[in-house]
Amino acid sequence: MKEKLFPVVMVLLAAAWMGSAMRAPSAAPDGLRIHEFGRIPVVEGGRLKPLDTVARNHLRIVATKETFKDKEDVSHPAIVWLLDAQAGLFGGREAHRHPVFRIDHPQIRDLLGLQPREGYRYSAEEIAPHFDALLEALKTAHERKESGKQLDVYENQLMEFERHLGSFRRIAEFDIPNVIPPHDGKDWMTFKAAVQMSDRGNLDPYADGWKRMLKAYAAKDVKEFNEAVASYHERLANERPEEVKRASLESRFNALDPFNKAKWLYLVGFLLAAFAWLGWSGPLNRASFWLLVFVYVAHTLALGVRMYLSGRPPVTNLYSSAIFIGWGCAAFGLGLERAYKLGVGNVLASVSGFVTLQIAHILAADGDTMEVLQAVLDTQFWLATHVTTITLGYAATYVAGLIGLIYILRGVFTTSLTPEVGRNLTRMMYGATCFATFFSFVGTVLGGLWADDSWGRFWGWDPKENGALMIVLWNALVLHARWGGIARDRGMAMLAVFGNIVVSWSWFGVNQLGVGLHSYGFTNGITVTLITFAFTQAAVIGCAFFPREIWRSKLPLKAGPEEEKIKPDA
């Protein structure tokens, strides 16, 4: 009975934990309705979004987090930071005292006269005394960049810090976001622009409402602030109901933070699958499987909501590609577990889900993850066909590589790789590689058709195009090596693991070159991570070269009749 109930209990606990975050954040009866303020729809970066999203995006840029701690070490949401910054117009200086700027480069700290501290976070007030020295250093860095010279790590970090300061300045000076809804055929405006355009102090009603909210907040008048926010929402709900609904949904989505929660549940699924290796394998593997099914459903629903909010197919940038690749890998893993019931599919689904969502979490630090696309990318048809298809090719190649890792690591370091398990893992690798070859080939061809439509040529040997071709050729090589008998089980595992390097180069590496028509996704600091990842995969491949006699799993040295090579029509 306990064995049957355990999977049910795990799923119910996961549902309760995720469901507890679905309640709308609320303030104390006598407190400021900060979260209601955060639901106000605004436009920034060409996209309608709640003010809460603006605050989270820019605080992530400045502080790498969506919350901050004040000087008393009390944690606050991002919307408080934004409110404090904009209340400065009416006498508030709190935002300048918040230690939100992360400065971990020693040369920049020395330049600003700052002492190292835990967390390396400093306030605008602490930076201000040495601001002239910072401007001089930035001027030198910009001159070097404009002259075509290579910037060193310090100069790159200096320019990144300039971006952080710029985010704070633009919010504090009301350059962003556009908060005044359009009327009389005009576009959304900033509060500053609305004030400048006012006729002798006769403010636009929305601008007047904005002024009332900020003044009340700066004066710490809770009653007036809450009434002003309620009045502003009432006007918006009457005049712009659809925009209010969309902004409110996105604000709730932000508070739920479904991808981050799914990430931790994927990790729990992995731990259950790992403990299954030690004993009580049946209940633990079933609990892992059904927990992962629940997480996968949540992952899918979150993808759907994100698509609705952005109005786009699932993959539009590096962040969304990480979420979608994790979704695809988890689907492969759960399908394999359903078919083979070895626990391997659970490991594949959980590891790929956790790792890709962690990558997405890191990529989110660049700002808005649903930003408006560049003109050449702004096409629903090609985003839904080429990008989605080739991303599924990435996912399938990673699945094959993960199975290869499991094969090698289990064979070299454990006694669990029996001949039957080895054959099943090879079948999984083969199936995943077939899927990967199909999706990557079709996706690459569709990409060529898009290029012909956008640029007038099917192929131009652009780095991104070369990376896509590398994936197709590598998967084809793996299959032909298997069909030709050149690679058997161990050889196929080694080739599949190397496919992880090939896909990672195409996914991230070519963007770091900064050249070509596809260079949209440069990510600071990714190069060292890519090189480290490649070395880890090469190390696993190196382990596979150990003689079979010294592998802990004593597999047959020669293939028996049941281990004949897979034919192309298998």
Image (spheres, rainbow, N blue to C red):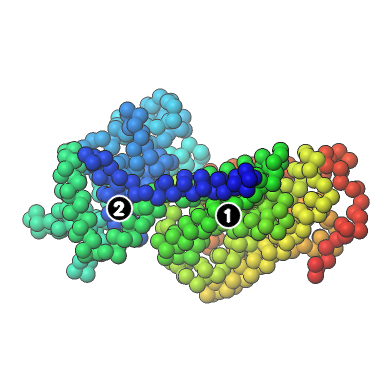
Point out residue 101 in the picture as x, y percentages from the top left corner. 38, 36
Point out residue 265 in the picture as x, y percentages from the top left corner. 54, 46
Q: Is residue 478 left or right of residue 158?
A: right
| Quarter of the rendering occupied by the C terminus | bottom right
The residue lying at 43 percent from left, 41 percent from top is 64
Q: Which residue is denoted by mark 1 in the rendering?
A: 293
Q: Which residue is denoted by mark 2 in the rendering?
A: 39
Crowd tier of the residue under label 1, counting other residues whose Cα lies within 10 Å: few below 14, some 14–19, many 20 or above = many
Which amino acid does the dot numbered 2 rest on?
Arg
Point out residue 133 in the picture as x, y percentages from the top left corner. 35, 33
Residue 92: quadrant of the picture: top left
The residue lying at 47 percent from left, 57 percent from top is 302
The residue lying at 9 percent from left, 57 percent from top is 202
Query: What's the CA distance linking mark 2 and mark 1?
Result: 32 Å
| Quarter of the rendering occupied by the N terminus | top right
As drawn, 324 above or below 28 = below
Q: Is residue 113 left or right of residue 216?
A: right
Point out residue 337 in the picture as x, y percentages from the top left corner. 68, 55
Which amino acid does the dot numbered 1 rest on?
Val
